[in-house]
Image (cartoon, rainbow, N blue to C red):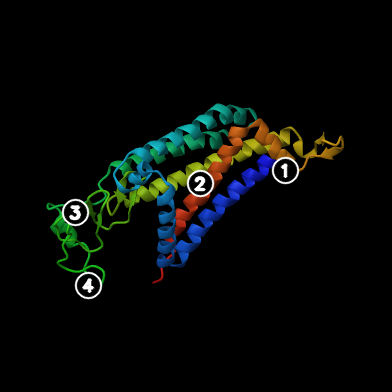
Amino acid sequence: MDFLWLFIFYVIFLVLGVSTFCFLSGRSTSGLDGALHRAEQVISRVAPVWLQRCFHTRSGAFVLLHLVLDVLVFAEYTWEVVDYSLEMEINWILVFLPYVLITGNLYFYYKCCTSDPGRVTKQNEAFYIRVYEYDEIMFHHSNECPTCHLMKPARSKHCGVCGSCIHRFDHHCVWVNNCIGALNIRHFLLYLLSLSLTVACLAAVFTAFLLQVVLLSHMMTAAYVDSRGHEEIASLAYVIQHLFLTFPRIVFTLGFLLLLVLFLGGLHVLRLVPVHH
């Protein structure tokens, strides 16, 4: 059972990490910034230089990684889950729904990667200046960007990664290799929503498949002989162990999907919880 405890500790560690991130983000911006800054300092000491460079320069590395993860998850799903799920009479709509959802998700992902987030240029500088009024607290009139040498519209920010000022700047996302701003924020939110639905649907089918295996094989009422020669009724831990040994890739993929659901849920919380200064 050592592998089971190792897997449980792995899941608990990641869940606690995501939960701590969401908790700090909901309390205050300064607390979150401090925690992220300290984490960045620690990571910068151990992470290779090429990996750190991906966060500070435009690079397609995370876009490629995103697509590879999509391919791996759906390859496992298609290869091991779809046929067996249909044979066990799991609703075919649920089985094929992830393919529909991932199609929409990839469309919004493409739009996030390729669309203009709202770059401020000499041609549109005057237009963006008129969109929002200057509050003279955070955004001052006649404030020029020292890098772009353009007047900075209110609620805009210069992105050091993209090298330009972005109207209603939200953040620079390495996963789409692009900034998220006024013009593509809707695509980004739809991307997150469709990805959350895709992951949740996949996790539901994986779970339904494993539950059907347990029910059809009567595992919960089965007995086994332990190392001392005693007959024991199968416990939940034994059932999980048996499923892991029989379907190791499916169990680990399901664990990855459940953690991804928590992480994506945390991203939604970040956008819904108001920040108090």
What is the number of the mark on residue 136?
4
Which SS class for mark 2?
helix
Q: Amino acid at mark 1?
A: Ala
User: Which quarter of the image is occupied by the C terminus?
Assistant: bottom left
Q: Residue at x 56, y 30 (%)?
A: 82
| Residue 268 to residue 79: above or below | below
What amino acid is labelled 4 in the image?
Glu
Residue 237: mark: 1
Sequence-wise first label, 2 or 1? 1
Q: CA distance from mark 1 to mark 3?
A: 58 Å
Asked if residue 78 shows in the view, the reply is yes
Q: Residue at x 67, y 31 (%)?
A: 246
**Front one among 266 and 62:** 62
Specify which label sits upstream in the sequence, 2 or 4.
4
Residue 266: x percent and y percent?
48, 55
The Cα–Cα distance between marks 2 and 1, rounded to whole angstroms, is 23 Å
Q: Eyeballing the image, is 263 above or below 202? A: below
Q: x, y percentage for residue 84? A: 61, 28
Q: Quadrant of residue 270?
A: bottom left
The residue that disc 2 covers is: 260
Q: Earlier in the sequence, mark 3 or mark 2?
A: 3
For the residue pair 97 and 261, the one nearer the viewer reads as 261
Few, some or many C-alpha atoms within 10 Å of disc 2 (few <14, some 14-19, many ≥20)? some
Q: CA distance from mark 4 to mark 1?
A: 61 Å
Circle 3 Cα neighbour tier, 10 Å, few/some/many (<14 / 14–19 / ≥20): many
**Numbered disc 4: secondary structure:** loop
Front residue of this view, candidates 123 and 177:
177
The tag earlier along the polypeptide, 1 or 3, is 3
Q: Amino acid at mark 3?
A: Val
Front one among 235 and 163? 163
| First in residue order: circle 4 vs circle 1 | 4
